[in-house]
Amino acid sequence: MDNNPQEQFPYPRYVWRRRFYQKLSALLFNILSDFTIIGAENFPQTGPLIVVANHFHFADPVAVLRVAPWPLEFLGGFHMPGAPPAITWIPKLWGFYPVHRGAVSRTAFRATQAVMAQNGIMGIFPEAGSWATVLRPARPGTALLAVQTGAPILPIGLDGMPQVFDLFSQHRRPKITVRIGKPFGPFAVSGKGKAKREELNAISEEIMRQIAALLPPEQHGVFSSDPVLREAAQAVAAYPYHELYKEGDERLGD
């Protein structure tokens, strides 16, 4: 095993290539959509920082890259269910740290820890998939990584992405609004076993509520104050990607 994670996971990487992709995404979004950024003043100048956002569409990472003012790393799944085959090569061009969906892998922890140690920024979608257009509970990985690294969290709300390609096909410019919240945290836990899991669950819920505050009420899903909307969201809240997890990337223990 590499004894120097910062050499294995350097930050930043692919600087010129990624800068070109960010400028290209900005150009395309500005031409093809009505793109609005709210709260850009909340971006910290530097890390360490974990960026979190809702995940309603497979192209959400591109929108996050469009607004990010600094080099951004991503943790992402090996698979992109629902994405057209022509799109699946984009994450590979950017370069991301792949993890098994739903798993908190040692690789993910080492990469995030190394990036944070270099005052870097890591992007994570806590829901771990884009199978619905309302908020669902976070998977446990984001909270655990935040606790293990001690990094603050910056929430982002992405509104309008699911309609992007449908409106393109109708020769209409979709309206996309990206809201940037204020950094919060860092977090720590003091318990072990069941008590630790309960503390991590509370942190996960706080992360999702911070994201919910940046979205229209009808998208709050299981975090909605409306019992009717909460009940409807429960129908799509179940995590559907367990079959994509493969043994071989060790989970972080308690």
Image (cartoon, rainbow, N blue to C red):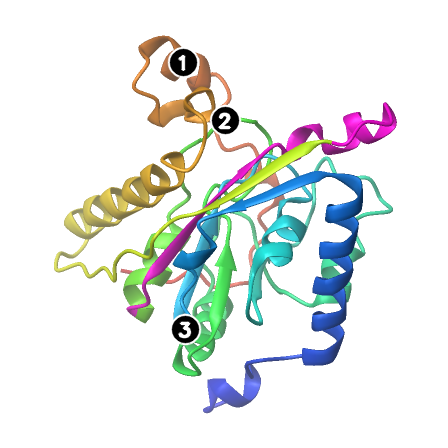
Against 39, residue 177 (above or below) is: above
The stretch of residues the image draws in magenta is: 150-173
Residue appearing at x 44%, y 83% in the figure: 118
| Mark drawn on residue 229 | 1
Kind of residue indicated by mark 3: Gly
Which residue is the site of mark 3? 47
Looking at marks 1 and 2 on the same chain, the residue that comes earlier in the sequence is marked by 2
Left or right: residue 67 versus residue 51 is right
Q: Which residue is mark 2?
A: 134
The Cα atoms of the two marked residues, 2 and 3, are separated by 29 Å
Q: Position of residue 103 (x, y in %)?
A: 48, 52
Q: Is residue 64 above or below residue 2?
A: above
x and y percent of residue 151 in the render? 33, 67
| Residue 66 disc label | none
Q: Is residue 176 left or right of residue 171?
A: left
Callout 2, which amino acid? Val
Report how far apart the C-alphas of labels 3 and 1 lie in the structure.
Answer: 36 Å
- Say which of marks 3 and 1 sits in front: 3
> Badges 1 and 2: C-beta atoms under 8 Å apart?
yes
